[in-house]
Amino acid sequence: MTTAEKPSVVAAPRATIGAKTLRKDRWWLAPGLTAAGLIAWLAYSVTRVFQQDNYWVGEYHYLTPYYSPCTSTGCIEGAAVFGRFTPDHPLLPYAMLSLPILLVFRLTCYYYRKAYYRTFWLSPPACAVPDGHKSYSGETKFPLIFQNIHRYTFYVAAAIVVLNTYDAILAFNTENGFGFGLGNLVLLLNVTMLWAYTLSCHSCRHVTGGRLKHFSRSPLRYRWWTFVSKLNVRHMQFAWFSLGTLAFADFYVMAVSAGWFSDFRFFN
């Protein structure tokens, strides 16, 4: 039988479905909760960043991570470990050198892209649910093409976490010498979650072993890549935990600084 004589196969037309999706579960719950969590965190954080008050407890050297490093000329002298050299203005955060970088690092994070693409842009809101837009160009055009700077902001963000860790260590040096209180645990928990989030980043995984062609020739990098890969599996959880500890650490320092309650001291 020749090709021309072969019977043609005609597929049956697809059924016309008027419903937006056939999913019967609460597919909207996850993006809804994600949106609520992100909006709540942003509202609190923006309020605190521009409040420019109750960010420092001089007695115990507690500095909120939202104001670290505090470089504004309006910063309290003890809080400005690295000097005061940026202008003081109500619209400029006291930590104006670090906060924009950290914001861009989080905005371009692979997990957060998924989170706000689904919740705010509905692209798509859930699996098997139509996209909220008629066309899709991915991250190849302006402004989403700038998502590619994530790999570069990772290095600066990691350096800022080093500064947050330094702040947590300095907090053990009170006005009366070495001391240890509940605030120290709060700050240590925060930097631990910040390190977990930063090291579990996809960019960190690529830096440690993404370009290796032979793991056997770089055993140390392979071990580090394996460790980062294990963290990477929990990157979403670390992203949320670190947001929570950031806000909680800031709230704790603010409450102690405002005199709402005293820091519980274990020693000195």
Image: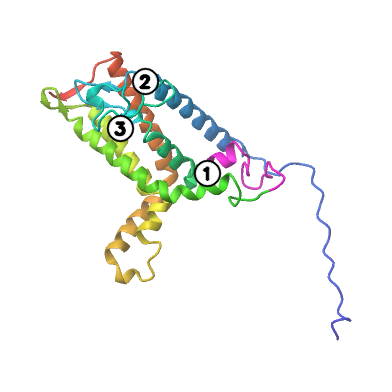
Disc 3 residue type (three-letter)? Pro
Magenta-highlighted residues: 115-135
The nearer-to-camera label among 1 and 2 is: 2
78 relative position to 227: left or right = left
Counting from the top left corner in percent of width and height, residue 4 is at 88, 81
Residue 183 visible in the current orientation? yes
Residue at 45%, 48% (x, y): give it: 150
Q: Is residue 162 magenta?
A: no
- Which corner quadrant holds the C terminus? top left
Instruction: Please provide percent x and percent y for residue 160.
Output: 32, 40
- Secondary structure beneath dot 1 equals helix
Q: Is residue 125 magenta?
A: yes
Q: Amino acid at mark 2?
A: Gln
Residue that numbered label 1 is attached to: 113
Colour mode? rainbow
Q: Secondary structure at mark 3?
A: loop
Residue most extreme to the bottom: 1
In front of the other: 226 or 22: 226
> Residue under circle 3?
69
Is 159 positioned to the left or the right of 130 in the image? left
Q: Nearer the viewer, residue 116 or 72?
A: 72
